[in-house]
Each structure stands twice: as C-alpha cells, then as structure tokens.
Amino acid sequence: MDCTTAGDCLTPYIDNELEPDVKQRLVEHLGVCGKCRERFEGDLRFERTIALRFPREEMPQEVWHRLQTRVRARAHGRRRGLLLAFGIAAAAMALFAVGLFRATDVRKPDLEQAVLDLHRRLEAGVEVCEMCPISPKGTSEFLEGQVETRTFAHRVAQTLDIGAHHYKFVGVATVRMMEHQFTCLEYECCGERICVVAMPSKDMDLFPGMQAALARAQGTITDTQGTTNFEAEIIGESLVCFVGKHPLEDLAVAYAGR
Amino acid sequence: MKSDPCVGQDRAASFICLLEEHKDALYAFAKSLIWNKEGAEDALQDAVFAAFRAFDTFELGTNFRAWMFRFLMNTIYNLNKKTRRSIEVPLTEQDAQVLESPNPPNLGPRLLQDPTGYLDLVSDPVKRAVLGLPESQRIAFLLRSVNDLSYKDISRIMGAPLGTVMSLLSRARVRLRAELMDFNSDAGKSPR
C-alpha cells in the first residue's frame, strides 16, 4: 500500500469500517511508514479528544420511569375496545374499597426497609409467606420499575387502622387488572388481606377509568360483603391510593361482570 | 443458543426491554443536538412514542439502536424546523460579544431556551466547533464519533447513501480540524 491510499484509509480504519484485507495491508504499511503512522496517531488523538468532550450522559431515572409509564399507557390506549371495560373495572376497584384509609404509627424508613428486605429474601429464593406467596418477578419489577411505589413506601405506614381493624404490612405483590399491572402493598388483619394500590396523580390522566373512579370514590356502598365505607385519597401531591380487598383482579372483573 | 430476553413479552414490555439498552445513548444524542434539557427530553419522548407506534414494523433481531436513532433524528429535524419558524429573536450586541460564537445555527432559540447551557457550551472550543458545523455534518459526526454508530447505520438513520455519509463525515472532520487548530496547539497536541 502506498502513502496516498493509506491516507485515504486512516479515517475508515479509526471508524472500524475497513474490509479485513485492506485493514491488514494498512496495518502493515503503518508498521513501516513513520510519516503515515504519525498522521494516524494524530487523527486518533483528534477523534478521542472530541469524543471525550461529549461524555456519555445517562438518562435520569425519573425520565426513564416516565417514558416506561407512558409507553405502557399508550399500549393500553391502543386497545380502545378494552377502555370501557377498564373504566368499569377501575371504578369497581374503588367500589370495593373497604374502609377509610388512615395511616397511623408512621415509621417510614421501616416500611421501605421491609420492602427491600423482602426483595433480598425473594432473590435468595426464600419463601416469604405461605398464605400468599409473592412472585420474585413481580417484586423485581416493582423495585426496578416503579419508583413511585417506593415513594409510596416512604409515605405510608407499617400499620394501617381501617375502621376497627389494625392491619400490619406483610409484603409486596404485583396484581393485574384487565390490561394494567399495579404494584400493591399488602396488609393483614384478622385473617384478611387487603391491597393498597398506589398511583402517581400525575399519571391519572392516562387512565380515564381511574379518573372516573376517583370522582366517585367517596361515600357508602352496599355490595355482596355488606355495607362499607370507602375512600380514595390523594396523599401529598403525587399519590392516589385505593384500598381494596385482595385479589383485586378477581373482584374487579367479577364486579364489572355484574 | 442464548435466547433474546426481549422476545416473547407483550408488545410494550418487549419495546421497553429493547429500548433500555440504548436509552442512555439516545438521551445523550438528544442532548447533544438540543442543548436544553427539557427540549431534549421532550424530543426523546416524542421519538419513543413514534417508534412505539411503528414497533409492529420492527423486526426483532435487527438493529434496534439504528432504528430508534432514526426516529429520534427525524423528531429533532422536525423540531428544529418548527423552532426556526416560530422563534426569531435578534441578539443584542452585548449577547453577541459574550457569546463570541462563530455564527452557530439556530442561535436565538437556543440562547432563549437554555442561556446557561448555551454559555457553558460556547465556552468549550470543541463543543462550539461541533455546534458550528452544518446540521447534516454535525449529525453524521455525532452519530459516528460520539455514538459509535457504523457508516451503514448512519446511512439508514439519515436516509442518505453511504457515500454521502462518508463525505459528510470527511467534511465535518476537515472543518473541525481547522477550527480546532488553535485549541490543539494550545494543548500541545498537533491535529495531524
């Protein structure tokens, strides 16, 4: 290879775009030609100098979570035929609420610690709860993809007093309702488990059914369980919580079907 | 054979799974063309939505990175067109003195959107020189030198023949070397 051809090949070589045989001939030429080697080293240094000025910037976690949430919401939006059903189901979730949500005995760091401990135990394959096994996959998704719920964990309690019942936090689960997947925190009292579902209020407009549910979610209803009070509540600026019996999916679907 | 973890999931999960690997590169690319954080995030979001709408046309196993970059680049092209049409703000003499910019494209909107970011940018001779490149050269250069995409991928992303891409890259580099001669000399490095 002569110096002119070598000069033309330097940039594609740096860009890793040379055919193997041309590359081989260029490398051989650079091995014997000091002038071309010096030019190559200058070009390489130039490229690296510039690339270093544009450091790889990581997408902030909140941006990534927002994108994921919106993509999922759009995926659901595509299935317009199911929107109405979802609206009914979401409203049903609120209608199945079983009492006034009140956080007492607020020990915020404990709750998050409990969630993280739970995750570690699940990762290690430890059966956490015989009565209600929690899927490690669901919990991983929760910890990796649902920061809002971790925020939730900061805000709510280790225990909940609902009516006369004193519920204790027992774990985390992912529940599906129609096309939507939610993370819920489970509490238990007197042999009964309930799920608390958290959703950022800023995402409410993505779920028309939830909006409808929230608008209706105060008062007294009578369902097959008897007469109960229920409430959906905005906690702080960003979270909307419904309190409902577990499993939400069965209940919601059953209710929508009535 | 190792199975693709993004295959076999529902549409949204599969898309998110593929996107996750390239999200940082896409974000950095958006930020390198739109120097205002919110603008870059908005452009990226629009590109992601557009790609997701067209996700049915993507063949799993092919180059998702290049496919996604193309949506982002189109979004940014369109955004720039809109911005140029809608914002025309003359710079004051004082602004011009502060910036000392070699006639960068789209200066007014960029300064308005993110004055601090812009001032940071123009204080760096390398970034200033890249910003001063014509748009197509700048995009080709950033895709290659910063995002490490192949000529073939850049050709697909820009919708331009391979030869055009190589020509754009070559012209960008010649221009950058000329612009940065002083910078390299100051740093004790010869560009050649």
Image: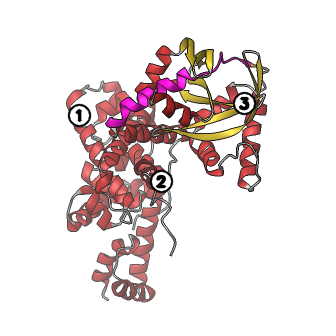
Regarding residue A205, the answer to whether it shows in the image is no
Letter of the chain that mark 1 sits on in the rendering: B
Percent position of residue A170, x then y = 75, 36
SS under mark 2: helix
Q: Which residue is mark 2?
A: B17
Residues in magenta?
A: A80-103
- Quarter of the image where one finds residue B38: top left
Give B138 or B13, whichever is nearer the viewer. Answer: B13
Percent position of residue A61, x then y = 55, 41
| Residue at x 39%, y 39% (from the top left corner) | A76
SS under mark 1: helix
Percent position of residue A113, x then y = 76, 38
SS under mark 3: strand
Q: Which residue is mark 3?
A: A192
Q: Is residue B166 left or right of residue B40?
A: left
Q: How is the image coloured?
A: secondary structure
Q: Quick check: B189 above or below B132? A: below
Please say if the residues under marks 2 and 3 sit with CB atoms less than 8 Å apart.
Answer: no
Q: Nearer the viewer, mark 2 or mark 3?
A: 3
